[in-house]
């Protein structure tokens, strides 16, 4: 499983952060490698108040992070730095690591979605990609 | 009487920063279970302001307290720290003035975590912010560009 920064992405602090987060999570939780092996598609994340965006391109053998939006994303996540960071802190339940709706961060993330501070486009078309992404980026 | 300003970076500034952290109840609350080690802040050499080597402040933080804050010139001082955050002099100036949020600054590449476990750092976003707000309470005199 490879985690790669595409040419030019190393200058994007958010891309570097996500690459480090994924690599460190894979080291700490080897079971996430199997999850990554099922991921295929593109996810764009736009941090609006930091004016930075990243595309994660999953191809079942790893993930490549690009500076900005590359290609047509299957899922696009838009929000503030606070709200996007919080999605990594959503509390999880059990072996499957499903989000725990009772958690403090989970409740706040749901509130951000309701108030449209956090928007997720393409979730209905690619629910598994989104669910696996949140697990891969979790710090819980 | 005007408050005496302390040069940044310096040993005196590091000591004042330690005291400001320990006087900050927000930091004590959010870092109460921090047992993940020391944090080094590396300010890159900036000859234009007379800083000819990297300057390093190492915070020995543990369970909501700062047990010690040391200052040294030369980046080798950061090698034993568990977390290392680096930025240019101007970026630190903006952070300490509250013009850059630390997490947003990292996303923008203005601050770099060059050592340490990022998932742990992200769990402690509020304590990172409280560290910055503590630093902002230190009356700081920044270096100006040499003519």
Image (tube, coloured by chain):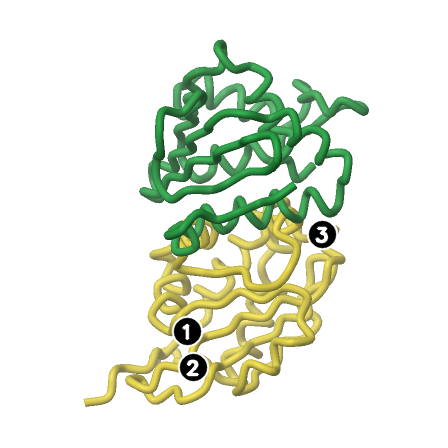
Q: Residue furthest left?
A: B147
Q: Secondary structure at mark 3?
A: loop
Q: Chain of mark 1?
A: B
Q: Secondary structure at mark 1?
A: loop
Q: Which mark is residue B6?
A: 2
Q: Secondary structure at mark 2?
A: strand
In the rendered image, the vertical position of residue A3 relative to residue A136, given as above or below: below
Q: Nearer the viewer, mark 3 or mark 1?
A: 3
Q: Which mark is residue B32?
A: 3
In the rendered image, the vertical position of residue A27 relative to residue B5, given as above or below: above
The quarter of the rendered structure image containing the C terminus of chain A is top right
Horizontal and vertical percent position of residue B83:
63, 64
Between the C-alphas of marks 3 and 1, the distance is: 26 Å
Horizontal and vertical percent position of residue A76:
41, 25
Q: Are marks 3 and 2 in contact (CB under 8 Å)?
A: no
Q: Quadrant of residue A97?
A: top right
Q: Chain of mark 3?
A: B
Which of these two is toward me, B59 or B23? B59
């Amino acid at each position: 499983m490879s985690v790669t920064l595409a040419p030019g992405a190393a200058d994007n602090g958010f891309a570097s952060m996500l690459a480090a987060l994924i690599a460190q999570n894979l080291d700490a939780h080897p079971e996430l490698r199997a999850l990554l092996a099922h991921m295929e598609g593109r996810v764009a994340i736009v941090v609006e108040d930091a004016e930075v965006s990243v595309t994660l391109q999953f191809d079942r053998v790893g993930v490549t992070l690009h500076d900005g939006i590359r290609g047509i994303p299957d899922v696009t996540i838009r929000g503030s730095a606070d709200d996007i960071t919080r999605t990594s802190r959503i509390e999880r339940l059990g072996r499957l690591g499903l989000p725990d709706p009772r958690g403090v961060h989970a409740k706040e993330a749901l509130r951000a979605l309701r108030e449209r501070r956090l928007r997720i486009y393409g979730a209905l078309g690619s629910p598994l990609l989104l669910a696996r992404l949140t697990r891969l980026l979790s710090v819980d | 009487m005007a408050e005496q300003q302390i040069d940044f970076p310096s040993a005196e500034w590091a000591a004042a920063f330690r005291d400001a952290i320990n006087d900050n109840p927000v930091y004590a609350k959010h870092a109460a279970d921090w047992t993940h080690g020391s944090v080094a802040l590396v300010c890159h050499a900036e000859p234009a302001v007379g800083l000819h080597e990297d300057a390093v402040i190492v915070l020995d933080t543990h369970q909501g307290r700062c047990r010690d804050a040391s200052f040294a010139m030369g980046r080798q001082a950061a090698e034993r720290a568990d977390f290392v955050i680096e930025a240019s002099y101007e970026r630190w100036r903006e952070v300490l003035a509250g013009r850059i949020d630390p997490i947003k600054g990292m996303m923008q590449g203005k601050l770099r975590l060059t050592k340490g476990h990022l998932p742990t750092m992200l769990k402690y976003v509020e304590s990172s912010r409280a560290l910055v707000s503590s630093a902002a309470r230190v009356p700081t005199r920044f270096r100006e560009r040499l003519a």
